[in-house]
Image (spheres, rainbow, N blue to C red):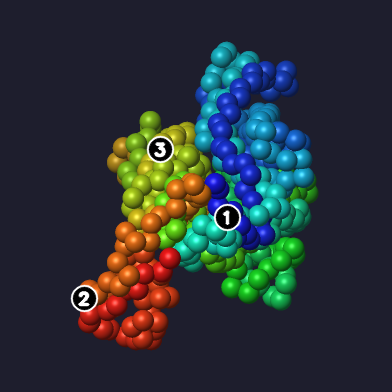
């Protein structure tokens, strides 16, 4: 016969689906008739943006794009030119566990972007995008609790389990407008050649039931001046938004990420030394709080032999945002001799979790001038290691990586890279617990009380497990405490104790 086991429950936002996938796309780009033939491709730059996401029963559909700028030198010589195109990515993730009314949190990371010269009038642009998605729905997290009283006379051991549960998931879209000026004394810019945007969530602050998300966007630009030379600048745009989750308990942790949906950079048509920047973003916020559930981990009966069914469950005990920093010093080889390093930007690949933290490949692209004034570009991949001492059961999930300092110094045979990176990650602590999910007994085969002594005398101390002693000797913890005058505040003790039989 089965013993009825009621469930201990916590209302929360359940992660019903989580997945990541890579998508590769390519397209051929034909040089317009108004532009010169391609001689040398200098760089291919872009930033991943989300165009839309839709959740239906059993499916999540995410549409993303990478607006691309391909800078090149004409075959017949002359000033650098720029081709603009866009790679579109369509990602359909299907799983029967996805409900129609769930909230999807997504992240994009551009892993690779490059172009190949097919002929002087045609290029092949290729990109690889990492898409991460997690769906949340209102639900209950449950664990087996104390058996209901019945003929079986079951004694239950309940242990408290601390859990980190999601209590709110929300998203807010907004736009950021900014104006910029080129460095003082800079010649007017005529054409944008390259651009990239790196987002950084800098501060999360709670004011009552509202959450203030403060962040910044670093936009790196490379442009052709009116005189044909090349220059670059970096624009840092700060912003803050008020997000109102459904609930924001005191002491809760917040997992926030920023997602681009549009980037628009315009140079002033008048003076060429100023411009405007428009960013479309969304702030995705997940609020977690600590809750405690009592969980059934052991049980016995002095009346019947029980047949338990056990299961190991891995639960999230805690999670909190962490900021990791690292510095990369590398010597990068260049195809030509470098007399002046102009502008550089970085791209971050897929992270690999290690016992000591995270390992992340970083692609570095840079422009430079040779001693004769020729414009060149090169790229290389370096490895960044974010160290974090992890304890057993802990792991890191990378959210974003942004450069805080980037410089290049010409050296013999190339450049010396100095790169400081800041990573936003989630530190997750998990624990595995053994729980009883079912109890069964044969009501036609009760135990014979006479097989067990009515009273057992043995030596024990405060370090012994009273539960184990009670189970082995057909008693209960309460009966042992009462027979020996023991309570939770008894402190350390060592003596002979009486264990009475309880049927």
Q: Quadrant of residue 463?
A: bottom left
Quadrant of the image containing the C terminus:
bottom left
Residue 249 in sight in this render: yes
- In the picture of the structure, the residue carrying the numbered disc 1 is 5
Q: State which tag comes first along the sequence, 2 or 1.
A: 1
Q: Which residue is more in the foreground, 370 or 53?
A: 53
Residue at the front extreme? Answer: 450
Q: Label 2: few (<14), some or many (≥20) within 10 Å?
A: few
- Marks 2 and 1 close (CB-CB < 8 Å): no
Q: State which tag comes first along the sequence, 1 or 3.
A: 1
- In the picture of the structure, the residue carrying the numbered disc 2 is 459
Q: Residue at x 57, y 38 (%)?
A: 19
Q: How many marks?
A: 3
SS label for mark 2: strand
- In the picture of the structure, the residue carrying the numbered disc 3 is 381
x then y, percent, for residue 259: 66, 48
x then y, percent, for residue 27: 64, 21
Q: Residue at x 71, y 33 (%)?
A: 58
- The residues tagged by marks 1 and 3 sit, at their Cα atoms, a distance apart of 56 Å
Q: Quadrant of residue 91?
A: top right
- The residues tagged by marks 2 and 1 sit, at their Cα atoms, a distance apart of 35 Å
SS label for mark 1: loop
Q: Quadrant of residue 466?
A: bottom left
Q: Which residue is more in the foreground, 481 or 503?
A: 503
Mark drawn on residue 315: none
x then y, percent, for residue 168: 68, 59
Q: Which residue is more in the foreground, 360 or 219?
A: 360
Q: Please say if 3 is above or below 465.
A: above
Residue 105 in sight in this render: no
């Amino acid at each position: 016969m089965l013993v009825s086991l009621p469930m201990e429950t916590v209302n929360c936002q359940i992660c019903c689906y989580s997945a990541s996938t890579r998508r590769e796309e390519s397209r051929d780009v034909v040089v317009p008739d108004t532009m010169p033939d391609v001689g040398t491709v200098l760089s291919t730059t872009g930033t991943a943006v989300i165009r839309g996401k839709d959740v239906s029963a059993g499916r999540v559909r995410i549409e993303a794009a990478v607006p691309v700028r391909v800078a090149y030198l004409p075959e017949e010589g002359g000033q650098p030119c720029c081709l603009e195109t866009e790679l579109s990515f369509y990602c359909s993730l299907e799983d029967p566990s996805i409900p129609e009314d769930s909230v999807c949190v997504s992240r994009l990371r551009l892993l690779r972007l490059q172009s190949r010269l097919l002929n002087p009038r045609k290029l092949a642009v290729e990109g690889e995008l990492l898409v991460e998605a997690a769906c949340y729905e209102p639900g209950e997290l449950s664990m087996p609790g104390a058996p209901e009283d019945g003929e079986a006379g079951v004694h239950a051991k309940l242990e408290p389990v601390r859990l980190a549960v999601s209590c709110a998931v929300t998203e807010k879209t907004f736009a950021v407008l900014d104006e910029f000026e080129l460095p003082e004394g800079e010649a007017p810019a005529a054409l944008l050649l390259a651009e990239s945007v790196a987002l950084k969530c800098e501060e999360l602050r709670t004011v009552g039931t509202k959450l203030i998300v403060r962040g910044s966007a670093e936009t790196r630009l490379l442009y052709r001046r009116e005189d044909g030379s090349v220059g670059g600048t970096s624009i840092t745009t700060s912003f803050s938004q008020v997000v109102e989750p459904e609930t924001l308990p005191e002491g809760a942790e917040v997992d926030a990420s920023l997602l681009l949906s549009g980037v628009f950079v315009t140079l002033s048509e008048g003076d060429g030394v100023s411009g405007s920047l428009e960013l479309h973003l969304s702030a995705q916020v997940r609020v977690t709080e600590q809750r405690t559930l009592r969980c059934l981990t052991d049980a016995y009966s002095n009346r019947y032999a029980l047949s338990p069914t056990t299961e190991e469950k891995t639960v999230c005990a805690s999670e909190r945002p962490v900021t990791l920093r690292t510095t990369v010093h590398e010597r990068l080889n260049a195809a030509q001799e470098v007399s002046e390093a102009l502008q550089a930007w970085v791209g971050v690949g897929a992270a690999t979790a290690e016992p000591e933290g995270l390992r992340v490949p970083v692609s570095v692209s840079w422009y430079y001038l040779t001693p004769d004034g020729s414009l060149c570009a090169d790229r290389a991949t370096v490895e960044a290691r974010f160290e974090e001492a992890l304890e057993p059961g802990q792991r890191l999930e990378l959210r974003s990586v942004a450069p805080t300092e980037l410089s290049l110094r010409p050296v013999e045979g190339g450049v010396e890279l100095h790169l400081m990176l800041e990573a936003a990650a989630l530190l997750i602590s998990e624990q595995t617990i053994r729980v009883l999910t079912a109890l069964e007994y044969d009501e036609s085969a009760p135990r014979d009380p006479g097989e067990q002594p009515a009273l057992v005398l043995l030596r024990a101390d405060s370090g012994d497990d009273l539960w184990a002693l009670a189970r082995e000797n057909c008693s209960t913890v309460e009966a042992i405490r009462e027979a020996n005058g023991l309570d939770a505040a008894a402190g350390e003790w060592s003596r002979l104790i009486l264990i009475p039989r309880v049927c």
